[in-house]
């Protein structure tokens, strides 16, 4: 999608009602669906994080950036994710967390990003994090400088590909719920994207499709 055409739709994104659990369920492992419907997050006393769903122009087209996390001894090792991370007490709010962590992880300065919308928080059981996703837009072409301590690679995903249903698949994976579980996922540049990232992406897709679907 041409970036200048996309910018015309941006004001319409702001008032769109978030589909929340309805969108998350579409990409949730079946073992999580009942939990999503009955979840009492406050009782979990979760840690807080924020992530950035960053859209930007590249050669005149609209792109979404994702990262490949480094391998480490933890539950999110080598997974595909959004730039973002843990809330710090020095952060004024969760929006500042998302901007700060995006700068630290992929080298995009906060002043280059306009926050458009706060999406539905996502609770992640294996790590006990409550993640606040933000939709941000940069109006200039970006260069990425990944933090090699945390980021193994950058994925630049064309918006037109992201909105194409062909990238939605089912994959057999070992999860925190079961070994060899069949789960909904996105096939993004030969990376299998599932779990919390896929569920957040699902809500973003629904909101974008509600707003700009007539373009396609």
Image (cartoon, grey):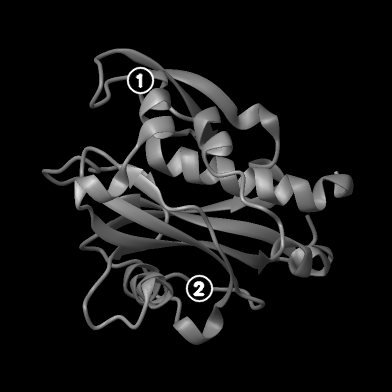
User: Disc 2 on helix, strand or loop?
Assistant: loop
In what quadrant of the picture does the N terminus appear? Answer: bottom right
Residue 202 seen in the current view: yes
**Tag nearer the camera, 1 or 2:** 1
In what quadrant of the picture does the C terminus appear? Answer: top right
Residue drawn at x 60%, y 49% as measured from the top left: 204
Question: Alpha-carbon distance for marks 1 and 2?
Answer: 39 Å
Residue drawn at x 15%, y 46% as measured from the top left: 72
Question: Along the line of sight, which residue is nearer the eye, 184 or 69?
Answer: 184
- Residue 71 vertical placement versus 27 (above, below): below
- Residue 39 vertical placement versus 103 (above, below): above
Q: Which residue is mark 1?
A: 31
Dot 2: few (<14), some (14–19), or many (≥20) neighbours within 10 Å? few
Q: Position of residue 76 (x, y in %)?
A: 25, 43
The reply to whether the C-beta atoms of the residues labelled 1 and 2 are less than 8 Å apart is: no
Q: Quadrant of residue 174?
A: top left
Q: Is residue 166 left or right of residue 196?
A: right
Q: Position of residue 92 (x, y in %)?
A: 34, 83
Dot 1: few (<14), some (14–19), or many (≥20) neighbours within 10 Å? some
> Residue at the right extreme?
214
Residue drawn at x 39%, y 41% as measured from the top left: 196
Question: Along the line of sight, which residue is nearer the eye, 28 or 36?
Answer: 36
- Residue 84 vertical placement versus 161 (above, below): below
């Amino acid at each position: 999608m041409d970036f200048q055409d996309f910018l015309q739709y941006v004001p319409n994104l702001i008032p769109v009602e978030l589909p929340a659990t309805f969108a998350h369920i579409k990409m949730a492992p079946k073992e999580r669906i009942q939990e999503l419907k009955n979840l009492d997050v406050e009782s979990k006393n979760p840690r807080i994080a924020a992530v950035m769903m960053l859209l930007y122009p590249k050669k005149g087209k609209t792109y979404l950036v994702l990262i490949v996390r480094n391998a480490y001894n933890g539950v999110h090792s080598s997974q595909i994710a959004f730039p973002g991370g843990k809330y710090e007490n020095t952060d004024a709010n969760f929006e500042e967390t998302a901007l700060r962590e995006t700068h630290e992880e992929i080298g995009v300065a906060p002043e280059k990003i306009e926050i458009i919308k706060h999406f539905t928080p996502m609770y992640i059981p294996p790590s006990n994090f409550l993640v606040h996703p933000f939709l941000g837009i940069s109006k200039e072409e970006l260069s990425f400088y990944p933090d090699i301590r945390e980021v193994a690679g950058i994925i630049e995903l064309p918006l037109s590909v992201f909105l194409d249903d062909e990238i939605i698949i089912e994959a057999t994976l070992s999860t925190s719920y079961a070994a060899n579980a069949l789960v909904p996922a996105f096939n993004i540049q030969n990376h299998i994207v599932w779990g919390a990232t896929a569920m957040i992406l699902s809500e973003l897709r629904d909101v974008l499709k509600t707003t700009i679907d007539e373009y396609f």
